[in-house]
Image: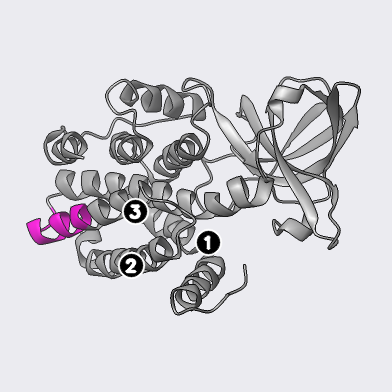
Amino acid sequence: MKDVLRFLLTEAPDFPALDSVEAWWRRHLAVLPRFQVPADLALASGFRMDRMGFAFSSGYQAALRSLFPQLPADRRAALCATETGGGHPSAIETKLTPKGAGWTLDGVKTYVTLGTHAEVLLVVASEGRDAQERNRLRMVRLDARTSGVTVEPLPPLGFVPEVPHAALRLDGVEVDPEDVLPGDGYTRYLKPFRTVEDCHVNLAVLGWLVKVARRCGWPVALREELVAVAVMIHALALEDPSDPAVHVALGGALAQMHRALERCEVAWEGVDVEMRERWQRDRRLLDLASKVRAKRLEVARQRLAGGAGED
């Protein structure tokens, strides 16, 4: 990661404002030719953003490309999992039904990050129950312009309002066989994405924070601590996201990141009011899914200790 480290430490920490999702995407794409490894891209594109919301968006795109390397680099993607009952495998009711040589897709997703601007949709769907009555999930790749796909914008959140979200309705969407991705939709894609997303989103936020720290003259010790945490998470982003040892190490790295952010609080007092208030509003993003992370960490500890653990 030598090149991206040098980028974080030497690139001009300017803050040209971004006024739209399209402007964010152009800046994200401008970084891609130089940093094609998703973990590098998350750090570098986060550094280039003017706010946490757009840094998050870049980290999210990098996470998707880490887990789905076949995605086209120049098209925005979105993972579509959450339904009325949540995102647990048992809650997935969207149906993937055989039809001729292909399939049809029907269902509703209630919350899709960047859904209004996604060009490629990655949809978690059920193809029925197995002998133990467990939901058999598959991952389906769709062009967002496919007939039968309806995207419904949702109101902005109270934090990172620049990041749009949408509901998704699928009515008899025809799916080609090659667009049903190989492997189990949960164990191969949905479950590991939780870890992959944690790594890449936090890398992007750390890249942005390093930029803020350098631009605003934060103490050298704080800047270097943020870089050190980024190095830890970057290393974990390159490992198997299903390995319980990775989950334990990531739990420690995220705890270290949280402590570093606490030490940055005094430094934020010297940042201009607009940026500081935006940070205070948006930092809630970092606490989302904290219960899921805590459960993942406990299961990982149990497995390493010789217990089975439960997903």
Disc 3, SS? helix
Image quarter where the N terminus lies is top left
Q: Nearer the viewer, mark 3 or mark 1?
A: 3
The amino acid marked with disc number 1 is Leu
Residue in front for this viewpoint, 293 or 98: 98
- In the rendered image, residue 232, in percent from the top left (x then y), is placed at 26, 56
- Residue 236 numbered tag: 3
Q: CA distance from mark 3 to mark 2?
A: 17 Å
- In the rendered image, residue 294, in percent from the top left (x then y), is placed at 50, 72
Q: Point out the stretch of residues depicted in magenta.
A: 218-228
Residue 40 lies in the magenta stretch: no
Q: Nearer the viewer, mark 3 or mark 2?
A: 3
Q: Earlier in the sequence, mark 3 or mark 1?
A: 3
Residue drawn 33% across and 69% down? 252
The amino acid marked with disc number 3 is Leu
- Residue 258 numbered tag: 2
Q: CA distance from mark 1 to mark 2?
A: 13 Å
Residue drawn 62% across and 24% down? 119
Q: Is residue 219 left or right of residue 254?
A: left
Image quarter where the C terminus lies is bottom right
Q: Residues within 10 Å of mark 2 (few under 14, many from 20)?
A: some
Please say if the residues under marks 1 and 2 sit with CB atoms less than 8 Å apart: no
Residue drawn 81% across and 43% down? 108
Q: CA distance from mark 3 to mark 1?
A: 20 Å
Q: Earlier in the sequence, mark 1 or mark 2?
A: 2
- Residue 148 numbered tag: none
Is any atom of residue 143 visible in this view? no
Disc 2, SS? helix
